[in-house]
Image (cartoon, rainbow, N blue to C red):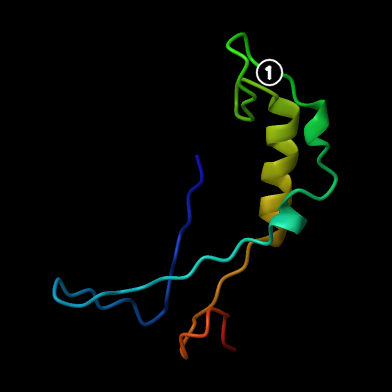
């Protein structure tokens, strides 16, 4: 399970007639740094899962990487990148 918490000191205005877009960027290279996916083992059904019950060591490493790379911001000019 992946959960994102988004906060703004001024709050957010949500209106049912307005489309509100929020952008979440994840650097996959950084997320999988140091992760050897070849070491993952398949479950009995032949499917490779990385979660809290299968390949838990890999799941823990990925979660640690996510914690270190997560950042947020606003995309004020709709170019797909955070603005300062």
Tell me the element at label 1.
loop
Give the residue at x 53% y 79%. Answer: 80
Q: Give the x, y percent position of residue 38.
A: 81, 31
Q: Give the x, y percent position of residue 14.
A: 23, 74
Give the residue at x 57% y 81%. Answer: 82
With respect to residue 32, does 5 lie above or below?
below
Q: Give the x, y percent position of residue 36.
A: 83, 37
Q: Which residue is mark 1?
A: 42
Give the residue at x 60% y 26%. Answer: 52
Which quadrant of the view contains residue 9?
bottom left
Give the residue at x 48% y 56%. Answer: 4
Q: Nearer the viewer, residue 13 or 41?
A: 41
Q: Nearer the viewer, residue 67 or 29?
A: 29
Residue at the extreme front: 46
Q: Nearer the viewer, residue 6 or 27?
A: 27
Left or right, 24 with respect to 54, comes to: left
Q: Give the x, y percent position of residue 25.
A: 58, 66
Q: Residues within 10 Å of mark 1 (few under 14, many from 20)?
A: few
Name the quadrant of the C terminus.
bottom right
Left or right, 57 with respect to 3, comes to: right
């Amino acid at each position: 399970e992946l959960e994102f918490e988004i906060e703004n000191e001024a709050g957010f205005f949500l209106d049912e007639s307005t489309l509100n877009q929020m952008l979440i960027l994840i650097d996959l290279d950084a997320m999988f740094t140091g992760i050897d996916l070849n070491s993952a083992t398949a479950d009995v059904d032949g499917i490779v899962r990385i979660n809290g019950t299968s390949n838990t060591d890999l799941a823990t490493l990925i979660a640690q990487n996510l914690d270190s790379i997560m950042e947020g911001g606003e995309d004020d000019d709709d170019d797909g990148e955070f603005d300062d």
